[in-house]
Amino acid sequence: MYTTPWCGFCRRLKRQLAREGIEVTEIDIERDPAAADYVMSVNGGNQTVPTVVFPDGTALTNPSAAQVRERLRGVATR
């Protein structure tokens, strides 16, 4: 999950995912220029976070916990 320290949406999503037992690895786009470039590449040039990348390489921007859960189910069944 691509984040920034000040992002309220990121904090909320992390809390929701933790409650559901979904682990994430956080990458701070302010500390990692390559991560910021990636986020911009999947968000039309914008550094929009949270951006969540899934094992199949797909990404969702500012998803709900339910959207993350559904995408993970879809990836697991492939």
Image: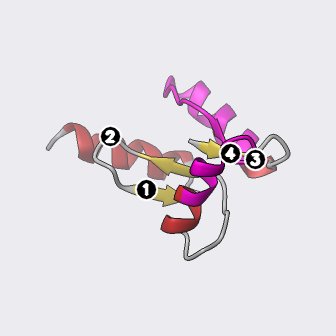
Query: Which dot marks residue 37?
Result: none
Q: From which residue to which does the magenta span run?
A: 10-37
Q: Nearer the viewer, residue 77 or 52?
A: 52
User: In the picture, which quadrant includes the N terminus?
Assistant: top right
At x 73% / y 41%, what residue is drawn?
Answer: 31
- Where is mark 1, residue-wise? 59
43 above or below 32? below
Circle 1 SS class: strand
Kind of residue at disc 4:
Thr
Q: Which residue is mark 3?
A: 30
Residue beneath the point at 66% across and 62% down: 48
Q: If you read the primary sequence from the N terminus, does the residue marked by circle 1 or circle 3 appear first?
A: 3
Q: Nearer the viewer, mark 3 or mark 2?
A: 3
10 Å crowding of disc 2: few (<14), some (14-19), many (20+): few
Which mark's residue is nearer the viewer, 4 or 3?
A: 3
**Residue 19 placement (x, y as % from top left):** 60, 26
Distance of label 2 from label 1 (alpha carbons): 9 Å
- Mark 4 / mark 2, whichever is N-terminal: 4
Q: Quadrant of the C terminus?
A: top left
- The residue at 53%/30% (across/down) is 24
Sequence order check: which comes first, mark 4 or mark 3? 4
Q: Amino acid at mark 1?
A: Ala
Are the residues tagged 1 and 3 within 8 Å (C-beta)? Answer: no
Q: Amino acid at mark 3?
A: Glu
1 or 4: tag closer to the N-terminus? 4
Cβ atoms at labels 1 and 4 below 8 Å apart: no
Task: Say which residue label 4 marks.
Answer: 3
Q: Is residue 58 above or below residue 15?
A: below
Q: For the view shown, which residue lies furthest in the right direction?
A: 6
Disc 1 residue crowd, few under 14, some 14–19, many 20+, Cα 10 Å: some
Q: Nearer the viewer, residue 74 or 44?
A: 44
